[in-house]
Image: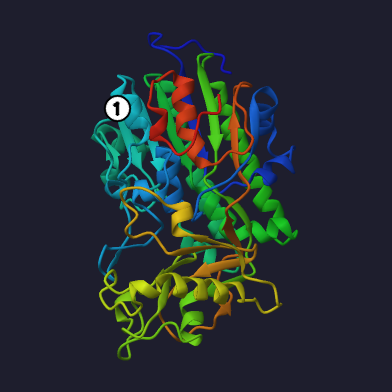
């Protein structure tokens, strides 16, 4: 807990939530010298590995973490979603999230919330005291509310995101320099607004961790050339978390969590190329670059990450599979996916999740029929160009994992066992003593 007295009146307990996108619990547990502060939080409070959601992609994970409900309720299934009754796709933004965010419940209770850099929150909401949107926002000015926040952040050289294209270079020096600069500015902004001490919920996310993991994680796991640089970056992340913790008063609980785990990537798996080779996917004409180009001979197609859709008659515009054959077709596709092996003979799929086992709610009309959770090393891509191999290599050497996300609560009453992302929002509300309907969440409070 912190050392400073609260500057504003005592309106009840507060929470500061710090997101560390894509940080696996094992990374923290296996490197106590690097993560002194996170391990200290676990020792004084609670900590452990938690599960992500299906699918474990940041664009779907953060809406679920911040609402406590599954994509069938949030309406967001991934970085790219499909329009109902159409092959048109779109990139979900903040207004596409159909469930109630945890900070909305806080403000509805008459409390104040500061929200900074949470993915899938653009454009910024105006019912909170301040917000700067995260991932996919066009620029700081447009992403900030009120205007004074944008001006303040620009004076700090605040950035929405790291320049991930730099990670495609063989030499990661320029990429890592940019990652450090982005991290430094994010910490300065978080520290400044935590010090304002006018909030009841502070909710901020470090997303640069995810970016660094994508391009250096195998270097860490296999002691590659960027191993030391990787751990040096994370030592700074941990130091910044420790400094933020020191700013908090004794009535404020610090919660730190990631949205999914991470592991090394060995292969990119181009699922639509594979479906085409297996005779399940076909195109009209010569242009094979978009979902809308598929023909009415297609039985199934895929969107990232590992989402498979039956080309169902009456649901898709050119659906070829009658509803009466849906279950049989889906079982055939499951069997086909189970038989997919990598170049070394290892099964690609760790498990295959049917839509009814993962998604429920008013917005499940665009839910995938199957979602594949891959074995470590296989990063499931989609793509509709037919000039790629099923298995190849891209610029990344790290990929998301469903298991091994992390959660740390600076409170020993939190019980972290059998936990997933859906449990975080009700936990934050309980820590703040904000009343809520427990049936509104797919998870349950941990305190």
User: Which residue is at the front of the view, 259 or 424?
Assistant: 424
Crowd tier of the residue under label 1, counting other residues whose Cα lies within 10 Å: few below 14, some 14–19, many 20 or above: some
The N terminus sits in image quarter: top right
Q: Tell me: 73 left or right of 205.
A: left
Specify how the rendered protein is coloured.
rainbow
Q: Quadrant of residue 412?
A: top right
User: Which residue is at the front of the view, 375 or 358?
Assistant: 358
Q: Residue furthest bottom?
A: 286
* Residue 256 x %, y %: 55, 34
* Residue 91 x %, y %: 33, 59
Q: Residue furthest front?
A: 324
* Residue 341 x %, y %: 64, 76
Decide: is 323 above or below 167: below
At x 43%, y 44%, the residue is 64
Q: Tell me: 46 left or right of 114.
A: right
At x 67%, y 22%, the residue is 44
At x 39%, y 37%, the residue is 116
Secondary structure under tag 1 reads loop
* Residue 404 x %, y %: 63, 47
User: Which residue is at the front of the view, 326 or 82?
Assistant: 326
Whether residue 180 is visible to the viewer of this picture, yes or no, is: yes
User: Label 1 belongs to which residue?
Assistant: 129
Decide: is 120 above or below 190: below
The C terminus sits in image quarter: top right
User: Which residue is at the front of the view, 12 or 4?
Assistant: 12
Q: Tell me: 24 left or right of 93.
A: right
Whether residue 57 is visible to the viewer of this picture, yes or no, is: no
Decide: is 380 above or below 277: above
């Amino acid at each position: 807990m912190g050392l400073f007295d609260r500057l504003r009146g005592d309106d009840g307990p507060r929470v500061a939530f710090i997101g560390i996108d894509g940080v696996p619990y094992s990374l923290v547990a296996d490197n106590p010298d690097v993560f002194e502060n996170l391990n200290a939080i676990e020792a004084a409070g609670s900590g452990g590995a938690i599960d992500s959601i299906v699918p474990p992609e940041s664009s779907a994970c953060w809406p679920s973490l911040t609402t406590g409900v599954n994509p069938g309720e949030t309406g967001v299934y991934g970085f790219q979603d499909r329009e109902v009754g159409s092959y048109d796709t779109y990139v979900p933004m903040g207004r596409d999230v159909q469930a109630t965010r945890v900070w909305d419940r806080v403000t509805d209770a008459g409390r104040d919330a500061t929200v900074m850099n949470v993915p899938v929150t653009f454009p910024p909401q105006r019912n909170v005291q301040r917000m700067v949107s995260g991932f996919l926002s066009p620029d700081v000015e447009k992403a900030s509310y009120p205007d004074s926040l944008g001006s303040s952040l620009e004076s700090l050289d605040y950035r929405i995101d790291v320049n991930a294209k730099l990670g495609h270079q063989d030499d990661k020096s320029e990429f890592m320099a940019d990652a450090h600069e982005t991290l430094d500015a994010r910490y300065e902004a978080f520290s400044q607004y935590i010090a304002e001490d006018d909030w009841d919920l502070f909710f901020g996310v470090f997303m640069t961790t995810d970016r660094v993991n994508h391009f250096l994680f195998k270097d860490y796991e296999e002691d590659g050339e960027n191993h030391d640089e990787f751990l040096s970056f994370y030592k700074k992340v941990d130091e910044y978390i420790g400094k933020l913790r020191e700013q908090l008063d004794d009535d404020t609980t610090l919660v730190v969590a990631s949205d999914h785990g991470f592991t090394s990537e060995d292969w990119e798996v181009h699922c639509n190329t594979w479906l085409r080779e297996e005779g399940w996917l076909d195109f009209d004409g010569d242009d094979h670059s978009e979902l809308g180009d598929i023909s009415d001979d297609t039985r199934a197609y895929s969107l990232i990450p590992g989402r498979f859709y039956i080309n169902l008659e009456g649901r898709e515009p050119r659906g070829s599979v009658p509803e009466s054959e849906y279950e049989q077709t889906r079982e055939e596709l499951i069997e086909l996916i189970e038989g997919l092996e990598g170049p070394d003979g290892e099964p690609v799929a760790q498990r295959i999740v049917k839509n009814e086992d993962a998604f429920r709610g008013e917005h499940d009309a665009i839910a995938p029929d199957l979602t594949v959770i891959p074995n470590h090393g296989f990063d499931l891509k989609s793509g509709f160009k037919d000039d790629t191999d099923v298995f190849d290599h891209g610029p990344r050497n790290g990929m998301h994992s469903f298991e091994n996300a992390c959660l740390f609560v600076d409170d020993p009453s939190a019980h972290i066992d059998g936990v997933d992302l859906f449990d975080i929002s009700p936990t934050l509300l309980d820590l703040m003593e904000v009343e809520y309907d427990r049936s509104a969440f797919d998870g349950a409070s941990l305190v």
